[in-house]
Image: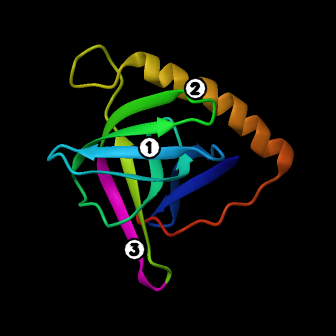
Amino acid sequence: MHMECVIMYDGLERRTIDRFVIPNAKVRYRLANGVSGTGELIDLSRSAIRFEVYFPLIEGSLLEVTIELPNRDEITLKGHVVWTFEIRRENKCFAVVQFLPFGTDARYNPPDSLAKIKAIEKTYLLDFKSEGFIIKDYPYKG
């Protein structure tokens, strides 16, 4: 599935990010302090991931996220929590993690992870466009 997010600043469109959904994909995460958890993937792009968590994560936290794909493949990426949102009446929490840059330095995400995301993106963007899905979106103050 695919979702296009247009981010607005001062009423002007600054950028467009293609996001897509991978049905039945799960997320595992581990914070730098060792706290870990699991969640449901909401959507993904080449630069970030949004997923449901059991408790709000602290914005700015560094963490490692592993996306468990339906074919049992995995992609592990490092990033920072840039947004959290809690819906108390539904007992739900969401987090957006922006990935660190891709490169060969140990501080970066490996380039092969970006190649995997691009390959997956082709499959799920096409699936979404042909099926015409609508995704319930939650506010993002990005």
Rendered image: mark on residue 60 = none
The local secondary structure at tag 1 comes to strand
Whether residues under marks 2 and 1 lie with C-beta atoms below 8 angstroms apart, the answer is: no
Foreground of the two, 127 or 82? 127
Residue 4 lies, with reference to residue 68, above or below; the image says below
**Residue depicted at 33% across the width and 29% down the height:** 101
Quarter holding the C terminus is: bottom left
Q: Quadrant of residue 108?
A: top left
Q: Position of residue 116 (x, y in %)?
A: 53, 23
Mark 2 sits on what residue? 118
Answer left or right for 24 relative to 11.
right
Foreground of the two, 23 or 37? 37
Dominant secondary structure (helix, strand or loop) of the stretch shown in magenta: strand
Residue type beneath disc 1:
Ala
Q: Position of residue 49 (x, y in %)?
A: 46, 46
Residue type beneath disc 3:
Glu
**Residue depicted at 38% across the width and 65% down the height:** 54
Residue range (magenta): 80-89
Mark 1 sits on what residue? 48
The local secondary structure at tag 2 comes to helix
Residue type beneath disc 2:
Lys
Answer left or right for 16 relative to 38.
right
Q: Nearer the viewer, mark 3 or mark 1?
A: 3
**Residue depicted at 64% across the width and 66% down the height:** 136
